[in-house]
Image (cartoon, rainbow, N blue to C red):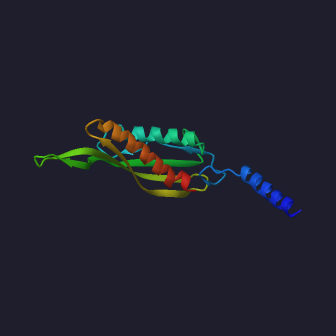
Amino acid sequence: MRIGYVLLISLLTICYGCMYSFNGSSLPSYLKTVDIPLFSNKSLQPNVADEVTQELGSQVVSSNLLTIVQRNGDASLSGEITSYESRPFTYSTTDVRQVDVDQYKVVITADVEFIDNKKNNEMYKGSVTGEGIFNFKTESEETGRKRAEKDLVKRILENSVQSW
């Protein structure tokens, strides 16, 4: 009898666990859509704001958290690229006391705002930075920039949409 009771409790626990799902977000249930206007660009790097905005849209769509609309979304996710830099990251030395740069790091920073338009409430506002490292000898800065853009978008979503 006692074994049957333990089995029943175990089975119910397993079944209950199967019914629960987690999508990484606890956004208010009334938020179904988001508009993502083109990020503005205060950096000197052309096209970076366009590329970050496109990547952000792609990641929101693939995450199935919200549906993107052109305007008047339940929420708005906007931003401004404030800086872009490519700087030496790792070095090596040669026998003749020469220092070579092996890797560079691209760093992109954006000011981001996530607003609940239904309740006219700021849900997140802050500065977010993404980084992308590339091997100077075998890769281009473009590779580092793409990595930094993807990292920036991941961090934007973690700090805004997915933090709820």
Is residue 110 toward the left or the right of residue 3 in the image? left
Is residue 153 toward the left or the right of residue 119 in the image? left
In the image, what residue occupies the spot 26% across and 40% down?
136
Q: Is residue 5 above or below residue 110?
A: below
Q: How many marks?
A: 0
- Quick one: 5 or 155, which is closer to the camera? 5
Is residue 140 toward the left or the right of residue 57 in the image? left
- Quick one: 122 or 109, which is closer to the camera? 109
In the image, what residue occupies the spot 54% across and 56% down?
163
Report x, y in % for residue 29.
Answer: 66, 52
Report x, y in % for residue 35.
Answer: 54, 43
Residue 94 visible, this angle:
yes
In the image, what residue occupies the spot 42% across and 47% down?
152
Report x, y in % for residue 75.
Answer: 57, 49
Q: Quadrant of the N terminus?
A: bottom right
Q: Quadrant of the C terminus?
A: bottom right
Residue 46 visible, this angle:
no
Report x, y in % for residue 125.
Answer: 47, 57
Quadrant housing residue 145: top left
